[in-house]
Amino acid sequence: MKPSNLLMILAIGLFFSTAHAAETLPEKSEAVSKDIKREANKAVDRIEEGTCTDTDVECTKKKLENRGKEGTDLIKDKSSEMKNKID
């Protein structure tokens, strides 16, 4: 194989290769702390839901609000983690 062809194949390969970035230590610790906080909030929500003494409709409403809040927190945290991995 000619050296020019080999060089061209190498250049094309490097051009189309994906960049792999790693999270830094502070970013990893931030992600872990957010995971812990999210799990703690989830546990508190489950306890509150289990001890709900209101009507079934009000308890279900609180439960749905908690699930929505948990989903929102999860999306925020995971999107910031993805941003940190890309940076």
Image: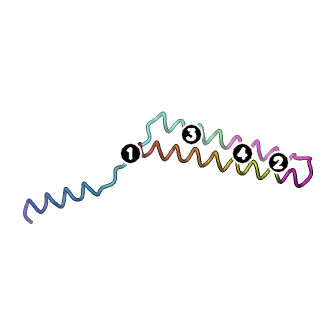
Local packing at callout 2 (Cα closer than 10 Å; few below 14, some 14-19, many 20+) is: some
Q: Are marks 4 and 3 in contact (CB under 8 Å)?
A: no
Apparent side of residue 83 relative to residue 50 in the rendered image (left or right): left
- The percent position of residue 47, horizontal first and vertical second, equals 81, 44
The amino acid pointed to by label 1 is: Ala
- The percent position of residue 18, horizontal first and vertical second, equals 33, 54
Q: Which residue is mark 2?
A: 49
Which disc number belongs to residue 65?
A: none
Residue 51 lies in the magenta-colored region: yes
The residue furthest bottom is 1
Q: Quadrant of the N terminus?
A: bottom left
The secondary element bearing badge 2 is classed as: helix
Q: Which residues are magenta?
A: 39-60
Which disc number belongs to residue 42?
A: 4
Please report the residue visible at 38 percent of the width from the left and 45 percent of the height from the top.
21
The amino acid pointed to by label 3 is: Val
Label 3 to label 2, Cα distance in Å?
Answer: 26 Å
First along the sequence among labels 2 and 4: 4
The residue furthest top is 26
First along the sequence among labels 4 and 3: 3
Please report the residue visible at 57 percent of the width from the left and 44 percent of the height from the top.
77
Which disc number belongs to residue 21?
A: 1
**Residue 3 position (above or below residue 69):** below
Apparent side of residue 15 relative to residue 54 in the rendered image (left or right): left
Q: Which residue is mark 3?
A: 32
Apparent side of residue 21 relative to residue 80 in the rendered image (left or right): left
The secondary element bearing badge 4 is classed as: helix
Closer mark to the observer between disc 3 and disc 2: 2
First along the sequence among labels 2 and 1: 1
Label 3 to label 1, Cα distance in Å?
Answer: 18 Å
The amino acid pointed to by label 4 is: Lys
